[in-house]
Image (tube, rainbow, N blue to C red):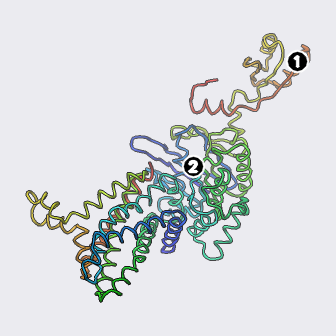
């Protein structure tokens, strides 16, 4: 498991990460969520041993990152932000370098490289110079070097950033495939990713941990959780009728859609559908909301709501 | 431990030969050293069978060519972000610093070895003292190592290769010239003699000249080894301080 204990990092007077403590068990895909400059990358850089913490420490499967750094690093695979690679090398040569640096020798190097290449479907570009590859392929090479030694924990800093929707989908599929018995820590500012990938999400802003929950748990914090949204002709009439329901607290009309918020008494969805049936309205859309992560994110990180 | 040093070294050398850097450097180095030897050095006109005109210009050649090799060592890694990849592998900072330095030093050594035709020439034309020539080759390589260690350290201080190059040339120039009267005269008026001797002793030129005359004095060799050691230690510290920004 990975355990962070009061992890703190200062850049001069700036407090980038402030007393961050958490622990992660295998089988978890943990998403670091936060605005730019929140301290997500700095936290990852400390976990992976690139930056020394100013104070506090972390343990990677029992190995302290300060006192037992090399052993801690051996148990991690890391994709730094932007997936930097030695562009002048061929994919094969680059992966062989990483394998050797990971301590493999001789035929083992070849075996490791080929296993990673198979896993990420890189066979067709094996001999190609990395800088000539497309962004999607480069990202795959970056992930290949991270999983080469089959580490029990992977740290991926914005693994899908800058990719097109198809490439994003592919990288997400790879991550969920690999996540079974590993610890995966990914950072992102794409909220849909948290829903699609993570089993646990931590919201970080200004270096502090503000929320630590499952994606469903975060959605439950949304005022849209279990709200009902309708699209119909006479919005005003429907709004005044629906606001009288004891199951509803509030009604909101926004961009031609009517949203009814639950009061917590009874089942709002059933009450709304019954009202629609009784009144005989022609409803073109009706939807039970699971909650809106972007709204939770803004509330938690304290940003002003702007729509 | 030493295994990782070899891994870093091998990757560095692979990068040299995967880009035009290696070929451009070797070709320019060979052309320039020939130009200096035959035109400026008067290799034939002197009528003496030695390589003095060849080695005499090495300090000046290195002054520009070695910072050109050294400037990319860390600045490029920092700019592209690969330094984060490198230093999160199970490799220590010391292994990375030393591995990169040794790769570049071996590479310069290769360029130096490729000047062997001039050694053959001088042996065909006369009977030179080959002991002196071997000593001068060793001295030249050691001096290149000194320039390289300075360049490597300054390369870690910035992500801009041009800045790294200019800083390295300036610092190398100071180290090169500190033994000349022109520099010493500046200090003569107000510094005590032992300090002035100390400054004079820092000069690459003084130590290289004495080795290249065929006197492979342990003190001169030790001087270059210490210079290299000092700047590589500094390189490690600078890297540690600057990698975060």
Residue A137 numbered tag? none
Q: Nearer the viewer, residue B234 or B113?
A: B113
Q: Is residue B88 above or below residue B44?
A: above
Q: Is residue A137 left or right of residue B113?
A: right
B2, B228: nearer the viewer:
B228
A64 above or below A8?
A: below
Residue at image x 53%, y 48%? Answer: A43
Q: Chain of mark 1?
A: A
Disc 2 on helix, strand or loop?
loop
Q: Measuring 61% from the left and 29% from the top, which residue is drawn there?
A: A299
Q: Does residue A250 appear in the picture of this structure?
A: no
Quarter assignment of residue B75: bottom left
CA separation in Å, label 2 and label 1: 50 Å
Between disc 2 and disc 1, the foreground one is: 2
Work out which residue is located at the far left of the displayed protein and give it. Answer: B189
Where does the image place residue B89, in percent across and percent down from the top left? 54, 62
Between A219 and A193, the one lying in front of the other is: A193
Side of B228 relative to A43 (left or right): left
Answer few, some or many: residues within 10 Å of disc 2's Cα (few below 14, many 20 plus, some between 14 and 19).
Answer: some
Q: Position of residue B100 (x, y in %)?
A: 45, 66
Q: Is residue A215 above or below residue A85?
A: above
Q: Secondary structure at mark 1?
A: helix
Q: Position of residue B153 (x, y in %)?
A: 37, 60
Mark 2 lies on residue: A81
**Residue on which the image places disc 1:** A276
């Amino acid at each position: 498991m990975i355990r962070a204990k009061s992890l703190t990092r200062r850049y001069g007077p700036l407090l980038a990460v402030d007393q961050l403590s958490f622990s992660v068990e295998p089988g978890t895909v943990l998403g670091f969520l936060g605005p730019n400059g929140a301290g997500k990358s700095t936290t990852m850089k400390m976990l992976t041993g690139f930056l020394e913490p100013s104070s506090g420490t972390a343990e990677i499967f029992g190995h302290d990152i300060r006192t037992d750094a090399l052993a801690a690093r051996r148990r991690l695979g890391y994709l730094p932000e932007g997936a930097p690679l030695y562009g002048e090398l061929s994919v094969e040569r680059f992966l062989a370098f990483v394998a050797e640096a990971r301590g493999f020798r001789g035929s083992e190097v070849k075996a490791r490289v080929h296993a990673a290449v198979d896993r990420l479907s890189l066979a067709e570009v094996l001999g190609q110079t990395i800088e000539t590859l497309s962004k999607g392929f480069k990202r795959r090479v970056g992930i290949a070097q991270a999983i080469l030694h089959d580490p029990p924990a992977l740290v991926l800093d914005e693994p899908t950033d800058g990719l097109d929707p198809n490439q994003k989908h592919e990288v997400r599929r790879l991550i969920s495939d690999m996540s079974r018995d590993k610890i995966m820590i990914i950072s992102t500012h794409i909220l849909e990713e948290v829903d699609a990938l993570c089993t646990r999400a931590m919201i970080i802003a200004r270096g502090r941990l503000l929320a630590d929950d499952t994606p469903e748990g975060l959605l439950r914090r949304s005022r849209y959780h279990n709200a009902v949204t309708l699209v119909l002709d006479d919005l005003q009439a429907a709004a005044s009728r629906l606001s009288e329901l004891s199951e509803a607290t509030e009604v909101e009309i926004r961009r031609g859609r009517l949203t009814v918020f639950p009061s917590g008494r009874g089942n709002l969805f059933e009450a709304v559908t019954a009202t629609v049936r009784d009144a005989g309205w022609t409803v073109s859309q009706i939807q039970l909301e699971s909650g809106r992560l972007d709204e939770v994110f803004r509330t938690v990180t304290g940003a002003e709501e702007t729509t | 431990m030493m295994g990782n040093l070899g891994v870093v070294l091998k990757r560095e050398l692979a990068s040299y030969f995967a880009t035009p850097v290696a070929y451009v450097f070797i070709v320019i180095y060979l052309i320039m050293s020939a130009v200096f030897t035959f035109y400026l050095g008067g290799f034939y006109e002197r009528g003496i069978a030695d390589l003095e005109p060849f080695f005499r210009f090495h300090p000046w050649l290195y002054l520009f060519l070695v910072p050109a090799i050294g400037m990319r060592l860390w600045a490029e890694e920092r700019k592209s972000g690969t330094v984060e990849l490198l230093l999160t592998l199970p490799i220590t900072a010391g292994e990375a610093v030393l591995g990169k330095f040794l790769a570049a030093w071996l590479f310069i050594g290769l360029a130096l070895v490729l000047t062997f035709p001039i050694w053959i020439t001088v042996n065909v034309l006369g009977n030179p003292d080959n002991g002196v020539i071997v000593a001068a080759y060793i001295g030249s390589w050691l001096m290149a190592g000194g320039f390289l260690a300075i360049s490597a350290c300054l390369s870690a201080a910035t992500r801009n290769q041009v800045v790294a190059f200019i800083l390295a040339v300036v610092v190398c120039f100071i180290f090169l010239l500190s033994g000349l009267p022109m520099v010493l005269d500046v200090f003569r008026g107000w510094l005590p003699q032992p300090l002035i001797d100390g400054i004079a002793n820092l000069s690459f030129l003084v130590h290289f000249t004495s080795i290249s005359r065929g006197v492979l004095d342990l003190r001169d060799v030790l001087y270059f080894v210490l210079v290299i050691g000092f700047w590589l230690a500094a390189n490690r510290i600078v890297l540690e301080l600057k990698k975060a920004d």
